Amino acid sequence: MNETLDGKVALVTGASRGIGAAIARELAAAGARVALAGREEATLQEVAASLPRASAALALKADVAEVADLDRLVADVVDRLGGVDILINNAGFLPQPKQIYSADLDEWQYVMNVNLRAPWYLSKLVHPHMRGRGGGAIVNIASTSGLHHDIGLGVYGISKAGVVMLTEVCAKEWARDNIRVNCIAPGTVKTQLAGSIIEYLQGKQMKPNPMNLYGEPEDIAKLVRYLAGDESRFMTGSIIRIDGGELL
């Protein structure tokens, strides 16, 4: 066990499954006390119990689309774990593929609330706590869809492009507070969220990328752990693709 995050407190959203659950496991294995947030309380508890340091894990039910839940979430983490050193904005929503003119206002707003407003607001909430502890690390999970246009994923792509810019703005403004903010843009990863995309690609016998590989949640989690720790102390504002060469 490489305890490079020993003594740190990490908050991971969307932690009940997929990439979020893998990130929680990776950070816990590195020594962090991990607060797991998600909408499915029973599943969260299962993931928390499976962590290498289950006694140091905290499962908190929260819907990132609700501002009141985000306020309560950060308050609970600070109260019960003493602060926040690492924030992983992982929770996301992928709507059914459609041309952007077919999206209605409610769908647009929900996607933006989950994928963009929540990372901004959580980052805003943890900022004073990180500054008071001498600094911190924020990792935003975007998507390759935020770096180029995928037909049918316009609203989703716009929200993730916003996450990319959010990362750069916060990184520049908060560098003086020793808060590093970086972003990961995964390609197609084997998760429930990407299930319909994988099914479509396989049905059309299309390669997802030049390597013809689908990512695993653990691939993303290992990169998150690096960005959360001191090994990446000279990195902030970085947008890192991890996509099997999808955008080459």
Image: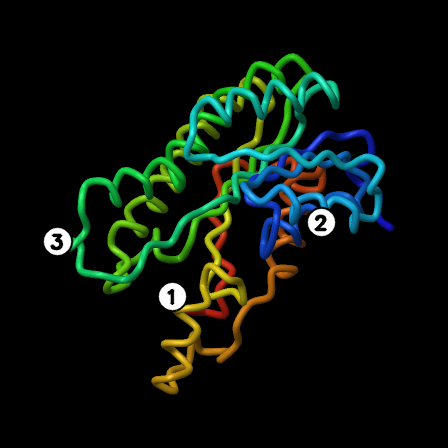
| Three-letter residue code for mark 3 | Tyr
Q: Is residue 224 left or right of residue 192?
A: right
Which image quarter is the C terminus in? Answer: bottom left
Residue placed at 51% from the left, 65% from the top?
Answer: 189
Q: Position of residue 111 (x, y in %)?
A: 33, 43
Instruction: Check disc 1: other Cα within 10 Å, few if <14, some if 14-19, many if 20+.
Output: some
Query: Could you tell me how far apart the alpha carbons at marks 3 and 2 are, in whole angstroms?
Result: 39 Å
Q: Is residue 99 left or right of residue 65?
A: left
* Mark nearer the N terminus (3 vs 2): 2
Name above or below for residue 171 compared with residue 135. Answer: below
Q: In the figure, residue 180 lies in which quadrant?
A: top right
Q: Which residue is mark 1?
A: 247
Q: Position of residue 36 (x, y in %)?
A: 65, 38
Q: Is residue 4 left or right of residue 229?
A: right
Nearer to us of marks 3 and 2 is 2
Kind of element beneath mark 3: helix
Name above or below for residue 156 compared with residue 228. Answer: below
As drawn, which residue projects farthest toward the front?
A: 42
Kind of element beneath mark 1: loop
Q: Position of residue 153 (x, y in %)?
A: 28, 58
Q: Position of residue 185 (x, y in %)?
A: 46, 53
* Mark nearer the N terminus (3 vs 1): 3
Q: Which residue is mark 2?
A: 47
Residue placed at 53% from the left, 76% from the top?
Answer: 213
Nearer to us of marks 2 and 1 is 2
Residue placed at 74% from the left, 18% from the top?
Answer: 82
Kind of element beneath mark 2: helix
Residue 101: numbered disc: 3
Query: Could you tell me how far apart the alpha carbons at marks 2 and 1 are, in whole angstroms?
Result: 33 Å
Instruction: Check disc 3: other Cα within 10 Å, few if <14, some if 14-19, many if 20+.
Output: few
